[in-house]
Image (cartoon, helix red, strand yellow):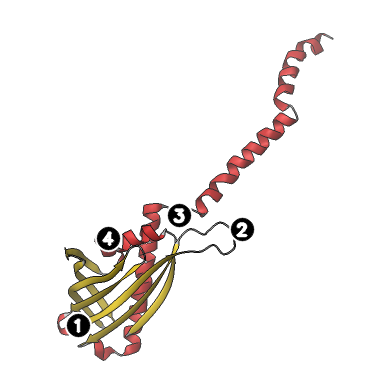
Amino acid sequence: MEMLGNRRLGVTQQQAWEALNDPATLKKCIPGCDKFELTGDNQYSVALAVKIGPVSAKFSGKVALSDIVAPDGYKLSFEGQGGVAGFAKGSSSVTLRPLDGAAEAAPAPAGCELDYTVQAQVGGKIAQLGQRLIDGAAKSTADDFFKRFEAEMQSRYGPPPAAAPEAAEPPAEKAGVMSGLMKKIGLGKKDDKDASAAPGDASS
């Protein structure tokens, strides 16, 4: 099985890199993951529940990172055993890059892009399910992971920085324009004059 994809993330390259190297974040975001623990230098012990078509299994295995170039990317290799359901092993590469501004006049958009590739082999019952079913389950798992990852990043860092100031500025700006206009036409002073002039007007 081979899979590749590209995702736009609403966090900086550094923030995405830190999250992709944090076992607690990965455990939270990988669908069905029960364990993602550091066991040595760039080595992790992993346990997750997988369902592909009619086959459900609990896989336990290990993940090892290599070719680490912070904060640009890394390669990882993985292998897992799912008992009678079979086994899975393979490798993946992950690359991060900051987004470039679409035009020179426009501010650079907040966020980064993530490219990934996965090559995997499966055996046992899972292998007998057919390539289309396996590919569909892999794509669904990847989509689910990125949905969870984006939600986790937003809860941790808030919405992308580009969106936040735009929402906050107009009300303040509007208030400034309004008070400026009121001063210009002398609304505040006029009230004072009217108040002090009122008794004179009444007697005449």
| Labelled pair 3, 4 in contact (Cβ < 8 Å) | no
- Name the residue rendered at 31%, 82% in the picture: 119
- Give the quarter of the image for residue 155: bottom left
What kind of residue is marked 2?
A: Ala
- State the residue position of label 3: 159
- State the residue position of label 1: 87
Q: Gap between marks 4 and 2, in whole Å?
A: 36 Å
Q: Look at the numbered disc 4 and give the secondary structure of its residue.
A: loop
Q: Look at the numbered disc 2 and give the secondary structure of its residue.
A: loop
| Labelled pair 1, 3 in contact (Cβ < 8 Å) | no
What kind of residue is marked 4?
A: Asp
Label 3 or label 4, whichever comes before in sequence order: 4
Q: Look at the numbered disc 1 and give the secondary structure of its residue.
A: strand
What kind of residue is marked 3?
A: Pro
Residue placed most toward the observer, 4 or 106: 106
Label 4 or label 1, whichever comes before in sequence order: 4
Q: Gap between marks 4 and 1, in whole Å?
A: 25 Å
- Name the residue rendered at 81%, 8% in the picture: 203
- State the residue position of label 2: 105
